[in-house]
Amino acid sequence: MTPDYINELAKRAFTKISPDEWRQSEKISRYLREKPNSESALAQELESQVPLQAEIAWHIGYTPSKWLLENELPEIQKRRDQHDIRSKGTQPPAAKIKDTEDGQYATLLSQEARILKPF
């Protein structure tokens, strides 16, 4: 099963919403009277009934934007690690660029440029 929003929503809803709570929630039970017997059956219902998906997401507090954020943060961290960029408040190491005239390397700060002024 691929990790996508529908499957994750089904997994969380299946564990958080009891069959009694399902029946008692008018907003959920108007789309599907009884709670499905498995996560996969719930995922199929969520896939085919977008209004049910919206109600369940709202009911358990797991909206698509929360799922996106959870899945983007590890990817952002991977990219930061790949480019050796540290978290908030710290500077990445200096980036090196090749000086074409003499083959030496010049060092530049990649995030902050500071101008030194004489006293």
Image (cartoon, helix red, strand yellow):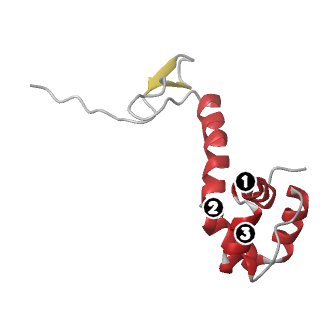
Question: Looking at numbered disc 1 in the image, what kind of residue is underneath it?
Answer: Arg
Q: What residue appears at the point 86 percent right and 65 percent down from the top-left corner?
A: 36
Mark 3 or mark 2: which is in front? 3
Q: Point out the tag, 3 or 1, that comes first from the N-terminus.
A: 1
Pointer 3 residue: 22
Indicate whether 9 appears above or below 1.
below
Local SS, label 2: helix
Q: Gap in Å between the C-alphas at discs 3 and 1?
A: 14 Å
Q: Point out the tag, 2 or 1, that comes first from the N-terminus.
A: 1
Local SS, label 1: helix
Residues marked 3 and 2 touching at CB (< 8 Å):
no
Q: Residues within 10 Å of mark 1 (few under 14, many from 20)?
A: some
Q: Gap in Å between the C-alphas at discs 2 and 1?
A: 8 Å
Q: Is residue 64 left or right of residue 102?
A: right
Q: What residue appears at the point 67 percent right and 48 percent down from the top-left corner?
A: 71
Q: Which mark is residue 12?
A: 1
Question: Looking at numbered disc 3 in the image, what kind of residue is underneath it?
Answer: Trp
Q: Nearer the viewer, residue 29 or 101?
A: 29
